[in-house]
């Protein structure tokens, strides 16, 4: 008599794969640039320089306008740790020093939709989003992890 295999191992494997994919998407984001920006292939290092205000102009001479989410936003924390190498609060002293050198921190907006609107309406803008990449609404310059395309 043949025994019927238990569906439990298949269910556990499916759950593990789904959980891994969900975690990967949670840790994923896209760095987006405005329509006037010609640099569409940035590195983590160049994005770090931009958000630390060490690079202030694109190669065309256009002033770079970086935009952040609030420091309490989980995506801001992920972006800061992944790209800048530290949590947002670790940069308080850095920005105090930069202020006295005439540099202000990046603009801050309330939501990812506000990031998209800022980037699309501000010459030289750069920001970051998660969730999915809205088709036809943004120019992606750097992907961290993998995000699906979507219609928003």
Image (cartoon, rainbow, N blue to C red):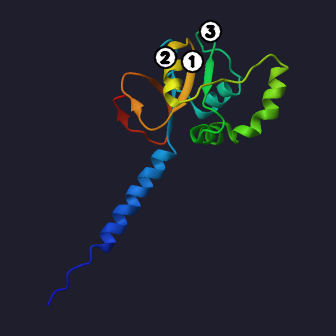
Which residue is rendered at x = 37% and y = 22% of the image?
136
Which residue is rendered at x = 58% and y = 28% of the image?
110
Please tell me whether mark 2 sits on a helix, a strand or a loop. Answer: helix
Q: Do the residues labelled 2 and 1 touch (CB within 8 Å)?
A: yes
Which of pointers 3 and 1 lies earlier in the amino acid sequence?
Answer: 3
Pointer 3 residue:
61
Residue 110 located left or right of residue 88: left
Pointer 1 residue:
125
The CA distance from mark 2 to mark 3 is 18 Å
Outermost bottom residue: 1
Please tell me whether mark 1 sits on a helix, a strand or a loop. Answer: strand
Task: Identify the disc placed on residue 120.
Answer: 2
Outermost top residue: 61
Q: Looking at the image, which is closer to me, 88 or 28? A: 88
Outermost left residue: 1
Residue 7 located left or right of residue 146: left
Q: Position of residue 5 (x, y in %)?
A: 24, 79
Q: Residues within 10 Å of mark 3 (few under 14, many from 20)?
A: few
Q: Position of residue 84 (x, y in %)?
A: 67, 36
Q: Which of marks 3 and 1 is in front?
A: 1
Please tell me whether mark 3 sits on a helix, a strand or a loop. Answer: loop
Q: Do the residues labelled 3 and 1 touch (CB within 8 Å)?
A: no
Which residue is rendered at x = 85% and y = 20% of the image?
100
Task: Identify the disc placed on residue 17.
Answer: none
Quarter of the N terminus within the rendering: bottom left
Q: Where is residue 44 in the image (x, y as percent from the top left)?
A: 60, 34
Which of pointers 2 and 1 lies earlier in the amino acid sequence?
Answer: 2
The CA distance from mark 3 to mark 1 is 13 Å
Using the rendered view, name the quadrant where residue 103 is placed: top right
Q: Looking at the image, which is closer to me, 151 or 123? A: 151
Residue 58 located left or right of residue 119: right
Which of pointers 2 and 3 lies earlier in the amino acid sequence?
Answer: 3
């Amino acid at each position: 008599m043949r025994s019927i295999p238990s569906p439990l191992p298949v269910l556990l494997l499916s759950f593990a794969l789904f959980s891994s994919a969900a975690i990967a998407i949670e840790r994923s984001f896209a760095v987006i640039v405005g329509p006037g920006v010609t640099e569409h292939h940035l590195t983590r290092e160049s994005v770090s320089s931009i958000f630390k205000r060490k690079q202030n102009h694109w190669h065309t001479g256009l002033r770079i306008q970086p935009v952040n989410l609030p420091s309490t936003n989980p995506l801001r924390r992920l972006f800061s740790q992944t790209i800048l190498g530290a949590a947002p609060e670790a940069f308080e002293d850095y920005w105090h020093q930069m202020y006295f050198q005439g540099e202000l921190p990046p603009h801050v907006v309330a939501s990812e939709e506000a990031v998209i609107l800022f980037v699309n309406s501000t010459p030289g803008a750069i920001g970051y989003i998660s969730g999915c990449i809205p088709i036809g609404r943004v120019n992606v310059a750097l992907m961290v992890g993998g995000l699906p395309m979507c219609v928003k």
